[in-house]
Image: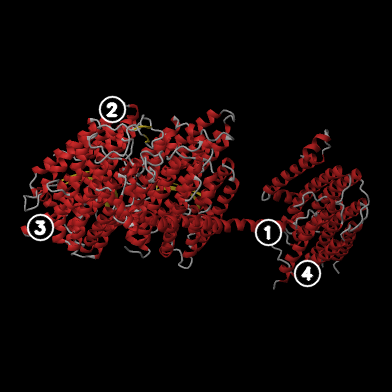
C-alpha cells in the first residue's frame, strides 16, 4: 500500500539530484534546471502530504511555489542573457565580479 | 487482492523510476537541449504523480506552467545563446567530488528523516471523497481567496516584479555604447 | 521704618550699570564724576543709616531688612537680607567714606586713560560687592559679596590687560597685570574653597546660615573647644587668609600692585583685604568658642606681620613696600582678633584704612607725575616739587609707624596692649619688633622718595611701560609737578583722618574708648583691667619702638647712605633671602604649579590619549583586521557559495535527525 | 489635558523638518527664516506648557496614553514632571539659540542641516517625555542619528572619526541597556514596558545589580563619566558650533536624566549599592576633567572637558540622595546647558572669524573685540560658579547635599571649583588678554546685532537664574522628594 513515505523518499531523491546538478554543472542554464528539479521535488512532497493528511493547503502552497519558480526562472534567464551579451560565453566560474 | 491499490503501486513505481532517471539525465546531459528535454520528462512524471495523489488540477497546472512555459523558455534561451557543449564538473574536481558526496549525504539524511518520522494523523477534513465531491478547483479557489489571499496578492506582485525585472535585464540596449560607459564609471 | 538699607549697595550698582552701558559714550568727566556721585550718595545713606542706628538704645542696635528668599530647597533656605549693627556700620562708613575719596582721586589719576568708563564701572561694582559683603545677614549672601570683590579685584588688577609689565625704569621683573589678576583670583579662590566648606559644615550643624540663628544656637549647643566649631572656624579662617592675604595665601597681594594705584589704595589697602578681618570679627561668637583656632589666628597674624615686614625692608618699589606693609598690618589685626581683642582689631582696621589709602595715593601721585616710575632708587628730592604730596605722605608714614598722637599709634598700641595682657609675651615682643621694622621701612620710603638729592634728571626720557598709551605720557621727558587739586584734596582729607581718627579709641589711661563702647553690644568682650602703670609702660615701649625705627631709617638713608650697601655686603645671604621674598613664589611654582601641570598633561596625553583612546581605537583596528581576513572567504566563486550552503543544510539536518 | 501639548512638542519639529525639505534649495533666506520661525513656535509651545505646569505635585502632567503594541504592553505614554520639565524647556530654548547661531557658519547643504536639527529636537524631546521604556529607547537611538550626521557632515577636518566614535561609544552602552529593558520586561512579570508599572514591581534582588549596571553604563557613556568620556572632546572639536551647543546643552543631560528617571526608580536597592562607586567616579570626573581642561590647546576641547567636570557635579548631586543635591543637580543641568551653550556659541563666533580653535592663534582680543570679551568673561564666570550667577546656585546645592552624606565627597568636589577658576581664567588670559600678537587678530569684527542679541538673552538668563533660582527650584521639589522616596523605601531611611 502506498504511504506518504514512498512519495517523500522520491522527492528526497529528486531534491538531491537537483542539488547535485546545481553544484556540478558550470552552465547556468543547467544550474537553473537543477533548481527547477529541487522545486518540483518540494512540490511533490507538498502534494503527497496534502493527500495523506487530507489537507488541501498543501496544494495551495504548490500553486504558490509554481509562481515563485516561474518568476525565478524568468529573472534568472534574463540575467543569463544579459551576462551572455556582455561576455559572449557563459561560465559561472568566470563571473566573479562581486568579489569581496 | 485490491486491484486499485496494486495498480496505484505499479503506476507510482513506474513514474518514480522515470522521474529519477530523467533527473539523472539532466545532470549528465552534455548539451543543454538534451538536459532540457529530460527535465520535461521529469515534469511529466510528476504531473502523473499528482493525478495519483488526487490533485488533477495541479497536474494540469504543472504541465501547462512547468512543462509548457518554463521549459519553452529554457529552450528559447538555449536557442538564442546556443552555448558550446559544456563539460561536466568543470575544472574544479575537488568541488565536484565534494558536491557529489554531500548531495548523496543530503538525500540519505532526508530519506532517513522521512522514514524515521511517524506518519501524522490525517486530521484535515478534506478527505479525497469530499474533495472529489465538491471539486478540486473550487476548494483551491476558496482557500486561495480566503485564508491565503495575502499570499495570493504577494505572489502576483512577485510575478509583476519578475516580469519587469526580466524585461529590463534582458533589454537589448539601443545605445549600447552609452550604457556601457555608464556602467564602467 | 521703610526699608532703605538695600539702597547703600544698590547705588554703586546703579552707577556701575550706567557706566557699563553708556559710560564709553559719555564724556570722560561725566562718566567719572557720575561714579563719584553714586559713591558719595551711598556714603550719605550710610551716614543716615548709622545715625538711625545711634538713635536705638545700645543693646538693640540692629537694623534687619529682608528683601526676598534667594534659595529655598527643603530645609535649606537663604535670603537676600541686610543686617546693620555697629560692626557693619563701621565697615560701611569706611568702605563708602574712603571709597568716595579714592574715587575722587581716581578721577585725576585716570585722566590720561582711555578706558575710564570701564575703570569706574568696575570700581562701582567693587563698592557694591563690598557693601553686600559687610551688610549681608547670612554667610551665603556674604559669600556672594566675598567672591564678588574677588571678581572686581581680578578685573581691576588686570585693568591694563594688554601691557606686559610695569617695572618702569628698573631691571626688576614683575608679573604682568593679567597674570597677577588671574593669580589673585585663583589664590583667593583657594581661600574661598575653605570658606565654602565652612559654610557647608555650618548649615548642617545649625540648620541655617543667618547670623541671628547661627550665633545663639552655637552658644546654646556647644561649649568652648567643641571640635565641630574648631573645624568650622578654621575653614572660615582659611577663607580669611585667602582674602586678607595672610600666610600662606598672601603671595597675590604684592603682584596685585600691577593694577592702577587707586585700585591698590581702595581694594588692596582699605577695604577688600579687610574682608577677612570683618568676617572673623563678625563670627566672634564662633571663634570665642574655639580657643585653638584663636591661637592659630593669632600666631598666623603675627607670623604674617613679621615675614611681610622683613620683606618690606628691602623692597625697592615703593608700591611693593606699601603692599607688604598692608600684609603686615593685616597680620596685626588678625593678631588682635586672635587674642580676642575684636574691637582693637576693628579699630586698627579703621585707622589703617585711612593712612594706608593715603600712603598708596601718595605713591600714586608720584607715579602719576613721574611716568609710572616708582622705583625708589631712581626717585628722591621730590619734597620741594610736590610739597602737599610730601607732607600728606609724611603724615601717613607717621601714622603707620605709630608715631605718638597719630592714629596708628593708638590702634597699634591697643593691639599690643591686648596682645600683652591676653595673648603671650612672645607674640607681644614680635609685635613690637614688627612695629619697629614698620617705622623703619616706611621712613626709608619717605626719605628715598622725597628726601635727599634727586636721582633723576629733568627731561630724562622714561618709557611709562604703557606702549599703546593713549595719552601723551607715552615715552617723554620727566617734568614732575604737584598733582592737580582733584588728587591732593583727598590726600589732605585722609591726612586729617590719619591724625585724628586715633582719638575714637583712646586707651583707658588717656580717655574713654568710644569705638570700643560703640562695638560693645556686638562683641560683648570681657574687658581686661590692666594697671595704669603697665599701660603706660606698654604705651612707652611702642612709642620708643617707633622712634627707634624712624631714627635708624634716617641714619641709614639720610645721614650716612653707605651703611645699607655695607650691611648688604656683610649679610649677602640674608639680603638675597629677603629680596627674593623667601622664594615663596618659586616654592609654590615647583611644589604646586609645575607638578599640577605635569599631572594634567599626564591625564590628557597618557590616560585619555594612550589608555582610553588607545583601547577604543585598538578595538576598532582589531575588528578591521578580522574583517580583512574574512574578506578572503568571499571569492566571488558562486558555486563555492552553493556548496557551502549545501554543507550547512546537510549538517543541520544531520543534527535534527541524529538528536535523540 | 485638553491640548495634547507633549505630542505637539514632539511632532511639530518633524512637521517643520518636512516643510523645510519642501522649500526651494537655493533660497537661503527663506530656509533660515523658516527654520527660525519653526524653532520659535516650538519654544512658544514649550512656554505654553510652562504656563500650565502645576508646580506642587509629583504626578506626571500633560499625560497622554495610547496603546501602541498592546500584546507586548508597549504604549505611547508621555508625561512630564518636575524632573524633566525644565529639561524640555532647556531643549527648546537651546534650539532657539542654536539655529540662529549657525546662520553665518553653515553655507553648504543648509536645508539638510536644519532638517537634521529639527529632527534632533523632536528626538530629544521624545526622550525627556517618554514614560514607556520602549518608547524611551526608540527616541534614545533616534536622537543619535541626526547628531552623528551633524558632526559627520558639517564638522571640521576629522569629523568622520569623531562621528563614528560618537556613535560607537553611545551604541555600545545603549545595546546593553536594550538587553536590560527586555530582561526587565520578562523578569518582573509585569509584561509591560510602562515605566510607572515597572516602578511598582520589585525587581528580583539577584537581577537588580546587573540591570542597574547595564542602564548605568549606557547613561554613564552619555553623561559622559570618567572612564568613558573620550568621545566628547573629539565630538566637540569636530562638531559645528550649533551642533556643540546642542551636544553639550542637551545630549549630555540625557544620561543624567536617565540615571534619575530609570536607575533610581527602577532599582532602588542597586542604587544604594552602586552609589559610592558612581559618586567616586563623578568626583574623579570633576578633578580629572578640570585638570585636563587646563592643558588643552584647543578651546573647544577645553570646554568639552569642562563639561565633563560640570556633569561630574550633576552625577554627584544625583547619587548622594539628598533633596538639596538632587535639586542642585537638576538646576545645574539647566545652568550647564546655558553657560556651556553660550561658551560654545562664542567659540563658534571666534571660529567663524579666524577658522581655528587653537588658543595660541589668539591673543589680546579684548582690545580688538571688547563686547565679545565682556560676554566671554561673563559666561566664564557663570561657568566657574561665581555667586550671583546661575552656576553657583547649582554647584552649591550639590556640595551642600553631598556634604550631608559624606563631607569628604563635598571637600574633594569643591576642589573642582578652584580648578575651574584656573583653567577658565588661564584660557581667557591666553585668548583675550596680553598684546595682540597675531596680525590676523588685529582686524576682527566685533559682535553683529544677531550675535549680540543671542548673548544678551543668555547673559540675562544667567543673572536671572542666579538671583531668582527659586523660580526653577520650586516646581521640581515635589518630584525630587518623591524620587528620593524610592530610596527611602529602599532602606536608606534618613
Which quarter of the image is occupied by the C terminus of chain D? bottom left
Which one is in front in this view, the residue at disc 2 or the one at disc 3? 3
Q: Name the residue under label 2.
A: C29
- Find residue C482 and report its horizontal and vertical position in percent: 25, 32
Q: Where is residue C423 in the image (x, y as percent from the top left)?
A: 17, 61
SS for dot 1: helix
In-image side of B152 versus C203 (left or right): right
Name the front one of labels 3 and 4. 3
**Alpha carbon separation for disc pair 2 and 3:** 53 Å
Image location (x, y in percent) of residue D274: 43, 63
Residue carrying label 4: B112
Are tags 2 and 3 found on a single chain? yes
Cβ–Cβ below 8 Å for labels 4 and 1?
no
- The residue tagged 1 is C626
- Mark 3 or mark 2, which is nearer the start of the sequence? 2
Q: Nearer the viewer, residue B54 or D385?
A: D385
How far apart are the two marked residues, 1 and 2, measured between alpha carbons? 77 Å
**Which residue is denoted by mark 3 in the rendering?**
C537
The residues bearing labels 3 and 1 have C-alpha atoms spaced at a distance of 93 Å
Q: How crowded is mark 2: few (under 14 residues within 10 Å), some or many (20 or more)?
A: some
Mark closer to the chain start, 1 or 2: 2
Measured Cα–Cα span from mark 4 to mark 1: 40 Å
* Tag 1 subunit: C
Work out which quarter of the rendered image holds the N terminus of chain D and state it.
top left
Badge 4, how many Cα within 10 Å: few under 14, some, many 20+? Answer: some
Amino acid at each position: 500500500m502506498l504511504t506518504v513515505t514512498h512519495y517523500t523518499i522520491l522527492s528526497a531523491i529528486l531534491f538531491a539530484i537537483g542539488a547535485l546538478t546545481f553544484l556540478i554543472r558550470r552552465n547556468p542554464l543547467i544550474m537553473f534546471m537543477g533548481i527547477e528539479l529541487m522545486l518540483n521535488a518540494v512540490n511533490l512532497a507538498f502534494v503527497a502530504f496534502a493527500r495523506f493528511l487530507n489537507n488541501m493547503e498543501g496544494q495551495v502552497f504548490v500553486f504558490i511555489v509554481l509562481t515563485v519558480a516561474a518568476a525565478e526562472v524568468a529573472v534568472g534567464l534574463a540575467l543569463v542573457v544579459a551576462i551572455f551579451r556582455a561576455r559572449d560565453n557563459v561560465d559561472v566560474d568566470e563571473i566573479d565580479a562581486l568579489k569581496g | 487482492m485490491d486491484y486499485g491499490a496494486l495498480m496505484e503501486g505499479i503506476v507510482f513505481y513506474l513514474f518514480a523510476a522515470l522521474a529519477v532517471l530523467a533527473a539523472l539525465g539532466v545532470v549528465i546531459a552534455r548539451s543543454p537541449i538534451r538536459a532540457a528535454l529530460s527535465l520535461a520528462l521529469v515534469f511529466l512524471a510528476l504531473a502523473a504523480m499528482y493525478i495519483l495523489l488526487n490533485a488533477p488540477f495541479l497536474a494540469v497546472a504543472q504541465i501547462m506552467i512547468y512543462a509548457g512555459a518554463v521549459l519553452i523558455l529554457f529552450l528559447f534561451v538555449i536557442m538564442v545563446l546556443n552555448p558550446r557543449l559544456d563539460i561536466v564538473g568543470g575544472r574544479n574536481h575537488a568541488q565536484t567530488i565534494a558536491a557529489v558526496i554531500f548531495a548523496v549525504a543530503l538525500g540519505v539524511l532526508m530519506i532517513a528523516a522521512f522514514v524515521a518520522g511517524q506518519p501524522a494523523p490525517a486530521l484535515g477534513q478534506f478527505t479525497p471523497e469530499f474533495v472529489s465531491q465538491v471539486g478540486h478547483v473550487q476548494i483551491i479557489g476558496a482557500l486561495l481567496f480566503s485564508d491565503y489571499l495575502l499570499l495570493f496578492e504577494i505572489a502576483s506582485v512577485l510575478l509583476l516584479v519578475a516580469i519587469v525585472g526580466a524585461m529590463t535585464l534582458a533589454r537589448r540596449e539601443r545605445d549600447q555604447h552609452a550604457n556601457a560607459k555608464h556602467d564602467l564609471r | 521704618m521703610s526699608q532703605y538699607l538695600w539702597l547703600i549697595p544698590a547705588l554703586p550698582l546703579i552707577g556701575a550699570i550706567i557706566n557699563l552701558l553708556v559710560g564709553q559714550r559719555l564724556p570722560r568727566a561725566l562718566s567719572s564724576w557720575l561714579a563719584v556721585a553714586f559713591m558719595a550718595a551711598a556714603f550719605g545713606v550710610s551716614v543716615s543709616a548709622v545715625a538711625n542706628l545711634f538713635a536705638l538704645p545700645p543693646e538693640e542696635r540692629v537694623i534687619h531688612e529682608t528683601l526676598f528668599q534667594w534659595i529655598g530647597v527643603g530645609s535649606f533656605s537663604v535670603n537676600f537680607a541686610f543686617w546693620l549693627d555697629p560692626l557693619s556700620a563701621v565697615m560701611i562708613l569706611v568702605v563708602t567714606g574712603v571709597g568716595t575719596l579714592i574715587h575722587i582721586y581716581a578721577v585725576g589719576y585716570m585722566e590720561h586713560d582711555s578706558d575710564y568708563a570701564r575703570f569706574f564701572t568696575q570700581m562701582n561694582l567693587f563698592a557694591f560687592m563690598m557693601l553686600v559683603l559687610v551688610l549681608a545677614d547670612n554667610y551665603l549672601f556674604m559669600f556672594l559679596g566675598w567672591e564678588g570683590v574677588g571678581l572686581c579685584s581680578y578685573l581691576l588688577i588686570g585693568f591694563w590687560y594688554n601691557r606686559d609689565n610695569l617695572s618702569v625704569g628698573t631691571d626688576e621683573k614683575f608679573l604682568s597685570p593679567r597674570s597677577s589678576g588671574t593669580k589673585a583670583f585663583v589664590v583667593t579662590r583657594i581661600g574661598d574653597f575653605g570658606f565654602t566648606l565652612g559654610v557647608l559644615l555650618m548649615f548642617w550643624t545649625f540648620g541655617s546660615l543667618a547670623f541671628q540663628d547661627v550665633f545663639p544656637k552655637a552658644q546654646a549647643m556647644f561649649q568652648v573647644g567643641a571640635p565641630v566649631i574648631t573645624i568650622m572656624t578654621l575653614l572660615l579662617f582659611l577663607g580669611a587668609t585667602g582674602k586678607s592675604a595672610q600666610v600662606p595665601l598672601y603671595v597675590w597681594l604684592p603682584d596685585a600692585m600691577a593694577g592702577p594705584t587707586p585700585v591698590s589704595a581702595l581694594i588692596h589697602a582699605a577695604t577688600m583685604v579687610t574682608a577677612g578681618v570683618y568676617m572673623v570679627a563678625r563670627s566672634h561668637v564662633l571663634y570665642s568658642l574655639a580657643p585653638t583656632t584663636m591661637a592659630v589666628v593669632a600666631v598666623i597674624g603675627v607670623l604674617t606681620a613679621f615675614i611681610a615686614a622683613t620683606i618690606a625692608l628691602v623692597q625697592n618699589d615703593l608700591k611693593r613696600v606699601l603692599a607688604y606693609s598692608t600684609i603686615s598690618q593685616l597680620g596685626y589685626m588678625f593678631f588682635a582678633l586672635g587674642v580676642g581683642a575684636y574691637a582693637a582689631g576693628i579699630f586698627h582696621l579703621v585707622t589703617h584704612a585711612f593712612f594706608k589709602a593715603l600712603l598708596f595715593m601718595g605713591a600714586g601721585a608720584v607715579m602719576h607725575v613721574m611716568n609710572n616710575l616708582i622705583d625708589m632708587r631712581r626717585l628722591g628730592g621730590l619734597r620741594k616739587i610736590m610739597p602737599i604730596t610730601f607732607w600728606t605722605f609724611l603724615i601717613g608714614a607717621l601714622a603707620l609707624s605709630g608715631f605718638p598722637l597719630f592714629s596708628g599709634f593708638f590702634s597699634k598700641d591697643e593691639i599690643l596692649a591686648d596682645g600683652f595682657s591676653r595673648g603671650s609675651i612672645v607674640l607681644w615682643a614680635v609685635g613690637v619688633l614688627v612695629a619697629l621694622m614698620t617705622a623703619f621701612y616706611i621712613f626709608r620710603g619717605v626719605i628715598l622718595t622725597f628726601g635727599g638729592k634727586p636721582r633723576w634728571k629733568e627731561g630724562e626720557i622714561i618709557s611709562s611701560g604703557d606702549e599703546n598709551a593713549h595719552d601723551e605720557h607715552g615715552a617723554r621727558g620727566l617734568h614732575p609737578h604737584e598733582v592737580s587739586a582733584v588728587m591732593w584734596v583727598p590726600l589732605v582729607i585722609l591726612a586729617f583722618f590719619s591724625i585724628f581718627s586715633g582719638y575714637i579709641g583712646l586707651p583707658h589711661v588717656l580717655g574713654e574708648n568710644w569705638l570700643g563702647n560703640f562695638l560693645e553690644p556686638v562683641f560683648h568682650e570681657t574687658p581686661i583691667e590692666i594697671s595704669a602703670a603697665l599701660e603706660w609702660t606698654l604705651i612707652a615701649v611702642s612709642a620708643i619702638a617707633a622712634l627707634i625705627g624712624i631714627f635708624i631709617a634716617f641714619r641709614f638713608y639720610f645721614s650716612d647712605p653707605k651703611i645699607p650697601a655695607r650691611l648688604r655686603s656683610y649679610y649677602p645671604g640674608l639680603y638675597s633671602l629677603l629680596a627674593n621674598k623667601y622664594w615663596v613664589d618659586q616654592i609654590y611654582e615647583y611644589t604646586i604649579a609645575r607638578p599640577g601641570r605635569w599631572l594634567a598633561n599626564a591625564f590628557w596625553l597618557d590616560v585619555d590619549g594612550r589608555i582610553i583612546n588607545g583601547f577604543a581605537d585598538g578595538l576598532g583596528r582589531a575588528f578591521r583586521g578580522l574583517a580583512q581576513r574574512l574578506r578572503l572567504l568571499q571569492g566571488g566563486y558562486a558555486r563555492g557559495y552553493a556548496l557551502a550552503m549545501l554543507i550547512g543544510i546537510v549538517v543541520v539536518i544531520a543534527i535534527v535527525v541524529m538528536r535523540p | 489635558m485638553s491640548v495634547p501639548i507633549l505630542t505637539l512638542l514632539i511632532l511639530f519639529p518633524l512637521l517643520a523638518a518636512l516643510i523645510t525639505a519642501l522649500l526651494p534649495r537655493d533660497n537661503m533666506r527663506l530656509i533660515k527664516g523658516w527654520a527660525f520661525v519653526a524653532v520659535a513656535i516650538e519654544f512658544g509651545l514649550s512656554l505654553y506648557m510652562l504656563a500650565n505646569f502645576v508646580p506642587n505635585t509629583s504626578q506626571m502632567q500633560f499625560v497622554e496614553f495610547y496603546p501602541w503594541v498592546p500584546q507586548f504592553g508597549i504604549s505611547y505614554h508621555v508625561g512630564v514632571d518636575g524632573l524633566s520639565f525644565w529639561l524640555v524647556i532647556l531643549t527648546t530654548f537651546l534650539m532657539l539659540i542654536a539655529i540662529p547661531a549657525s546662520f553665518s557658519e553653515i553655507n553648504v547643504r543648509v536645508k539638510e542641516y536644519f532638517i537634521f536639527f529639527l529632527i534632533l529636537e523632536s528626538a530629544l524631546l521624545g526622550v525627556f517625555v517618554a514614560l514607556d521604556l520602549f518608547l524611551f529607547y526608540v527616541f534614545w537611538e533616534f536622537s543619535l542619528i541626526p547628531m552623528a550626521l551633524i558632526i559627520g557632515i558639517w564638522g571640521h577636518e576629522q569629523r568622520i572619526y569623531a562621528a563614528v566614535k560618537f556613535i560607537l561609544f553611545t551604541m555600545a552602552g545603549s545595546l546593553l541597556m536594550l538587553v536590560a529593558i527586555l530582561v526587565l520586561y520578562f523578569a518582573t512579570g509585569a509584561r509591560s514596558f510602562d515605566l510607572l508599572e515597572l516602578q511598582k514591581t520589585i525587581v528580583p534582588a539577584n537581577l537588580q545589580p546587573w540591570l542597574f549596571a547595564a542602564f548605568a553604563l549606557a547613561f554613564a557613556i552619555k553623561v559622559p563619566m570618567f572612564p568613558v568620556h573620550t568621545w566628547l572632546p573629539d565630538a566637540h572639536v569636530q562638531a559645528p558650533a550649533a551642533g556643540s551647543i546642542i551636544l553639550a546643552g542637551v545630549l549630555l543631560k540625557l544620561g543624567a536624566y536617565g540615571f534619575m528617571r530609570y536607575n533610581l526608580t527602577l532599582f532602588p536597592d542597586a542604587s544604594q549599592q552602586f552609589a559610592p562607586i558612581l559618586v567616586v567616579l563623578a568626583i574623579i570626573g570633576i578633578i580629572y576633567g578640570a585638570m585636563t581642561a587646563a592643558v588643552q590647546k584647543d578651546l573647544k576641547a577645553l570646554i568639552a572637558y569642562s563639561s565633563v567636570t560640570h556633569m561630574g557635579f550633576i552625577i554627584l548631586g544625583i547619587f548622594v540622595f539628598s533633596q538639596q543635591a538632587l535639586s542642585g543637580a537638576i538646576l545645574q543641568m539647566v545652568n550647564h546647558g546655558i553657560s556651556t551653550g553660550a561658551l560654545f556659541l562664542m567659540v563658534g563666533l571666534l571660529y567663524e572669524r579666524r577658522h581655528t580653535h587653537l588658543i595660541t592663534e589668539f591673543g589680546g582680543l579684548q582690545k580688538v573685540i571688547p563686547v565679545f570679551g565682556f560676554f566671554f568673561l561673563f559666561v566664564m564666570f557663570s561657568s566657574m560658579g561665581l555667586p550671583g550667577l546661575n552656576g553657583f546656585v547649582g554647584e552649591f546645592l550639590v556640595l551642600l547635599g553631598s556634604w550631608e552624606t559624606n563631607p569628604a565627597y563635598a571637600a574633594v568636589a569643591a576642589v573642582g571649583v578652584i580648578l575651574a577658576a584656573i583653567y577658565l581664567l588661564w584660557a581667557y588670559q591666553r585668548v583675550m588678554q596680553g598684546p595682540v600678537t597675531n596680525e590676523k587678530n588685529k582686524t576682527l569684527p566685533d559682535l553683529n546685532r544677531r550675535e549680540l542679541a543671542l548673548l544678551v538673552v543668555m547673559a540675562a538668563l544667567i543673572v536671572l537664574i542666579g538671583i531668582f533660582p527659586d523660580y526653577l527650584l520650586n516646581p521640581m521639589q515635589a518630584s525630587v522628594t518623591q524620587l528620593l522616596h524610592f530610596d527611602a523605601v529602599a532602606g536608606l531611611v534618613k
